[in-house]
């Protein structure tokens, strides 16, 4: 029997830059940061979700060849990857806090579908939707 999803990988252009963004601006914390030669396994997690990790991966060897890695970096930079979703209690308050920390928003908080949501990007171009929890 499976126990659930533990890690989801996210391509980033620079692990140190991504680490600063997710820890300093979004309030995540480092779960794992280990190296094996040139390879670095780096994961962060939301403090309210300790069983789930977000892997911050630079596209390249040993998983991708150089040409594929370059294509992936370009796709990510364009914001073409499916957005991730961050649940918050108060979208407008979270927007104000994050904007003050320099988060690049692509959409201000907007009421729709019975809730409030906003959009932002990480420094690599990955899109996020921030959605206020219902009720």
Image: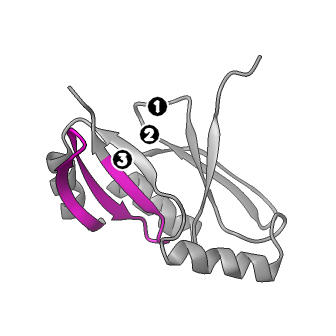
Q: Mark 1 Cα within 10 Å, few/some/many (few <14, many 20+)?
A: few
Which numbered dot is residue 27? 3
Taking 122 as reference, is 128 above or below it? Answer: above
Q: Mark 2 Cα within 10 Å, few/some/many (few <14, many 20+)?
A: some
Which numbered dot is residue 49? 1
Magenta residue check for 120: yes
Which quarter shows the C terminus?
A: top left
Query: Which residue is depicted at the point 51% across and 30% down?
Result: 50
Q: Secondary structure at mark 1?
A: loop
Magenta residue check for 29: no
Q: Is residue 96 left or right of residue 6?
A: left
Q: Main secondary structure of the magenta part?
A: strand
Which quarter shows the N terminus?
A: top right
Q: CA distance from mark 1 to mark 3?
A: 12 Å
- Looking at the rendering, the stretch of residues picked out in magenta corresponds to 105-130
Question: Are circles 2 and 1 on residues that touch, CB within 8 Å?
Answer: yes
Could you say where residue 64 lies in the image, as x and y percent from the top left? 80, 69
Q: Secondary structure at mark 2?
A: loop
Question: Are circles 3 and 2 on residues that touch, CB within 8 Å?
Answer: yes
**Residue that numbered label 2 is attached to:** 46
Q: Secondary structure at mark 3?
A: loop
The residue mark sitting in front, 1 or 3, is 1
Q: Is residue 119 left or right of residue 64?
A: left
């Amino acid at each position: 029997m499976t126990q659930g999803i533990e890690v989801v990988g996210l391509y980033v252009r620079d692990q140190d830059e991504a680490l600063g963004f997710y820890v300093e601006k979004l309030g995540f914390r480092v779960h794992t940061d280990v190296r094996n030669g040139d390879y670095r396994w780096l994961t962060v997690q939301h403090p309210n979700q300790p069983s789930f990790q977000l892997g911050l991966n630079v596209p390249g060897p040993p998983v991708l060849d150089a040409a594929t890695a370059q294509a992936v970096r370009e796709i990510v930079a364009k914001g073409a990857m499916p957005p991730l979703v961050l649940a918050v209690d108060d979208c407008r308050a979270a927007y104000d806090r994050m904007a003050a920390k320099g988060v690049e928003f692509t959409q201000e908080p907007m009421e729709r579908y019975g809730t409030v949501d906003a959009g932002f990007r990480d420094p690599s171009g990955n899109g996020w939707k921030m959605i206020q929890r219902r009720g």
